Image: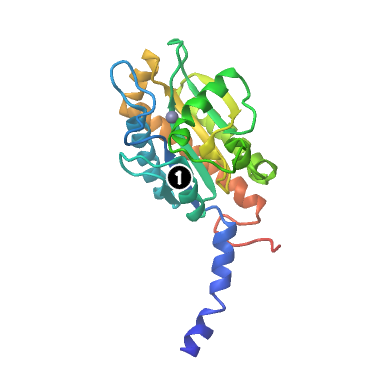
Amino acid sequence: MGLLILAASPLTPLRAEVSKERFDTVVIDAGHGGEDTGARSPDGLSEKDVVLEVTQRLAGRLRKSGLNVALTRSGDEFVPLEVRTAIANEAGGDLFISIHANSARNTKAHGIETYFVSLEASDEGAKQVAERENDAFERTGARVGQGQDPLVALLGDMIVTEHLRESSEFSKLVQAQLIETTGGGSRGVKQAPFVVLMGVQMPASLIEIGFLSNRGDVKSLSKKRHLEALVEGVARAVEAFRKRYDARRGVGPDGSVLRSN
Ligand SMILES: [Zn+2]
């Protein structure tokens, strides 16, 4: 027994150090699920279904490229937002990607937009999107602290961490790649107080892959080829982000630590 410990000890800390530094785990969060259908197109396409489809395809694509993937839900089930956050943190993710589909009263609104977290929404439209997506949080009656705005309390010190800068970086990368691979309209990178992005201890983005209230977007989202293009766009952005992430932390392409801290 003593021999076993001696034999294992020189290797174990090294491995732990490498896996901690290296970009190797992505958490993908399919919005909504179960009783929470999310947005719905006039002909009945549900946000919860289309985002699960994209999430599963994306998980397969990222695993093929050698990454570990954790999912906050893998079926049609209701998962509270705070549980999603806990799953992401327990998985030790290096990046959190939440996939959603949009809806607006103006049926002409269309295209893709990517968000990262902030206390203040970047515009009125962004504020409304966050309110709609935070609905599942309000529904569970989750509260943090008495008499305190739960959003403010949850945001906590997250806003001052380096994750915010990296969240912004990934959001820009993924928005650009998505427009390139899908040829879709870009609504840009925005910020808003999404509960699901708060409290995840890693860079985090939320992608609205299109409007279920827009006929053209619904037509696209019903096509396998378009879903594959969305997956390809996200996967390319993850790959680009992974390289930058590892380079910043002194991890070489083969996973070796080039620089010791
Ligand atoms: Zn949603």
Query: How many marks on residues?
Result: 1
Question: In the picture shown, does residue 104 fall above or below 135?
Answer: above
Closer to the camera, 251 or 165?
A: 165
Q: Which residue is mark 1?
A: 84
In screen coordinates, is 182 left or right of 143? Answer: left
**The C terminus, quarter of image:** bottom right
Closer to the camera, 125 or 239?
A: 125
| Disc 1 within 8 angstroms of ligand 1 (CB) | no
Question: In the picture shown, does residue 29 fall above or below 133?
Answer: below
Question: Residue 123: x, y in percent?
Answer: 61, 20
Per the image, label 1 sits on a secondary structure element best described as helix
Q: Residue at x 39, y 49 (%)?
A: 64
Question: Residue 100: x, y in percent?
Answer: 44, 31
Question: Residue 156: x, y in percent?
Answer: 65, 43
Closer to the camera, 140 or 16?
A: 140
In screen coordinates, is 76 left or right of 105? Answer: left
Question: In the picture shown, does residue 59 fall above or below 100?
Answer: below
**The N terminus, quarter of image:** bottom left
Amino acid under label 1?
Arg
